[in-house]
Amino acid sequence: MEYVTAAPHPRPEASGPARAGRLSLALALLSGALGAALALLATRQQWSEGTATVAGGSFPLTAMGSDVTGVPAALAIVGLAALVAVFAVRRAGRLIVAGLLTLCGAGTVAAALAGASDSSALDEKAAQASGDTSATVAALTHTPWPYAAAVGGALILLAGLLALRYGHLWPAMSGRYERGGAPRARRSAAAVDPDRPEDLWKALDRGEDPTGTGPA
């Protein structure tokens, strides 16, 4: 007697959209968080240096990223908040927040690149040091940190573009409501014994009709 062994069914693979949603979600979270951290770190570093002439002598001046511009740090914080808020909204709201995230990234890049050649912060320090409002800094040089902030902005921008393209495939924070927006149906209440007053009071407290004829 021959026995026929049924071939095991192949394990169903994840569909293309589901896989794309997971990969894009992981990449957006990583790039957004890393970009915001890099932009914030870069703005706390030295961006430029130069010299100011006072009483025939010169002394060095330095400017931090926050001295040059506060825009990259502010946009990085807003972008990080928008990245979290993407998961708290759905549909049109998610598109709006994703658009805000994208704008934060683009704005961070633009502000950082503009600050890479800015000398106004050092000129102001030179004027204060010399007492001459028309004084400017000499031998101006810049560090790579403004470009690091621009890279951070580019990562935030990437997270925003991923949210715009694949955000509809990402899960939401709260599972309280179904896709249609209606609350999930309550579980069927336990049967109420009309001969037990405590059961009647509990049913009334839950907003149920202990008689079963209609709402309480």
Image (tube, rainbow, N blue to C red):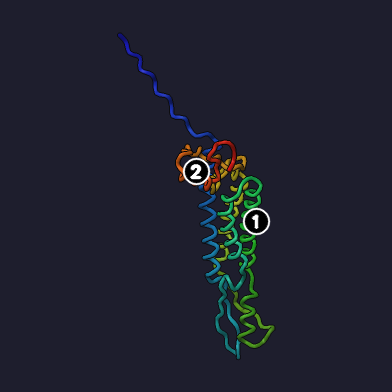
Return the residue at label 2.
200
Which residue is found at the position 53% from the left and 53% from the top? 31
Residue 200: image x %, image y %? 49, 43
Residue 98: image x %, image y %? 62, 51
Which residue is found at the position 59% from the left and 38% from the top? 214
Q: Quick one: SS at disc 2?
A: helix
Return the residue at label 1.
103
Circle 2 crowding by C-alpha within 10 Å: few under 14, some 14–19, many from 20: some
Q: Is residue 193 visible?
A: yes
Q: Amino acid at mark 2?
A: Leu
Q: Is residue 177 left or right of residue 8?
A: right
Where is the C terminus found, in terms of image quarters? top right
Q: Amino acid at mark 1?
A: Leu
Q: Which mark is residue 93?
A: none
Q: CA distance from mark 1 to mark 2?
A: 57 Å
Q: Is residue 55 left or right of residue 37?
A: right
Where is the N terminus found, in terms of image quarters? top left
Q: Residue furthest left?
A: 1
Q: Quadrant of residue 170?
A: top right
